[in-house]
Image (cartoon, rainbow, N blue to C red):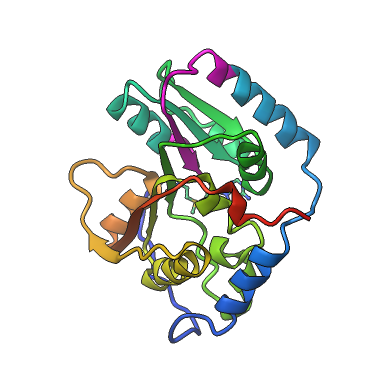
Amino acid sequence: MTGHSRAITSNQPGPHRDLTRRVERALQHPLRKPVADHTREAFERAEHWRDARARMPLILDAGCGVGLSTRRLASEHPGCAVIGVDRSADRLSRDHGPLPDNALLVRADLVDFWRLALAEGWQPARHYLLYPNPYPKSVHLKMRWHGHPIFPVIPALGGRFELRSNWRLYVEEFALALRQATGVEAGVEAFEPDGEPLTPFEGKYRQSGQSLWRLVTELPHRPELLPVE
Ligand SMILES: C[S@@+](CC[C@H](N)C(=O)[O-])C[C@H]1O[C@@H](n2cnc3c(N)ncnc32)[C@H](O)[C@@H]1O
């Protein structure tokens, strides 16, 4: 990924006024959409891979793109099993060198993969959401992860959770949604990655001189956040 990247522009001056309502709805009504067969199969393969690493703490890299961060996290945490998930076969297929033995790339829809992970009792030690698609137009709130019906599953999984974005408001809204769903207060901070960027998008934004924002918080595993219908 190269080149200049423009800073986010949005017609939203502050947190979306429907955010609280969206989160409330997601907390009251769990997503019922059936899990796609291809993600169920991908999840089963991931479970099988994990079985061979049952004693290793799990790191999830959600929306891993080309999997650079998955590789880096696996090298930084050799004692952990790192799973990168992305729905784009094209991104996942790009050659970024061999995968370490403690890393796995999975093609799957996170909306399904996260639900299966929670249902199977997965408890990631660390959970990364690095530069999710921002969907900055106000009308697209429901496509941002914190405005999506899947949202409560993310904190329910628990672990040290880290979100990074080049759009401050995305991280601020996510923090508000987290507080509403869990009571956890997570601070939003500007940060400068030291050394190599963790992901291609991080590199691209940095090259363009954009500010980077993140939220890091420790979340308890709380499957009961999801109502049983
Ligand atoms: C802006 S890119 C960031 C990729 C990478 N984390 C990075 O920083 O370079 C967002 C990624 O999220 C993935 N994504 C978006 N929605 C997804 C979903 N429902 N399930 C799985 N991956 C998804 C996209 O395919 C894309 O690779």
In the picture, the quarter occupied by the C terminus is bottom right
Residue ID at (55%, 85%): 17
- Can you say whether 98 is above or below 155 in the image? above
- Can you say whether 139 is above or below 41 in the image? below
Q: How many marks?
A: 0
Q: Residue extending furthest top?
A: 52
Residue ID at (32%, 42%): 198
- Can you say whether 183 is above or below 105 in the image? below
Tell me where residue 20 appears, x and y as whole percent.
56, 77
Q: Nearer the viewer, residue 183 or 164?
A: 183
Looking at the image, residue 73 sits to the left or right of residue 86; the answer is left
Tell me if residue 51 is in the magenta stretch.
Answer: yes
Q: Nearer the viewer, residue 200 or 123?
A: 123
Looking at the image, residue 69 sits to the left or right of residue 151; the answer is left
Q: Nearer the viewer, residue 50 or 199?
A: 50
Tell me if residue 139 is in the magenta stretch.
Answer: no
Tell me where residue 151 appears, x and y as whole percent.
59, 59
Tell me where residue 99 appears, x and y as whole percent.
44, 21
Residues rendered magenta in the picture: 49-67
Tell me where residue 56 appears, x and y as whole percent.
42, 21
Residue ID at (45%, 71%): 176
| Residue 64 visible in image | no
Q: Residue extending furthest left?
A: 194
| Quadrant in which residue 140 is drawn | bottom right
| Quadrant in which residue 113 is drawn | top right
| Quadrant in which residue 79 is drawn | top left
| Residue 8 visible in image | yes
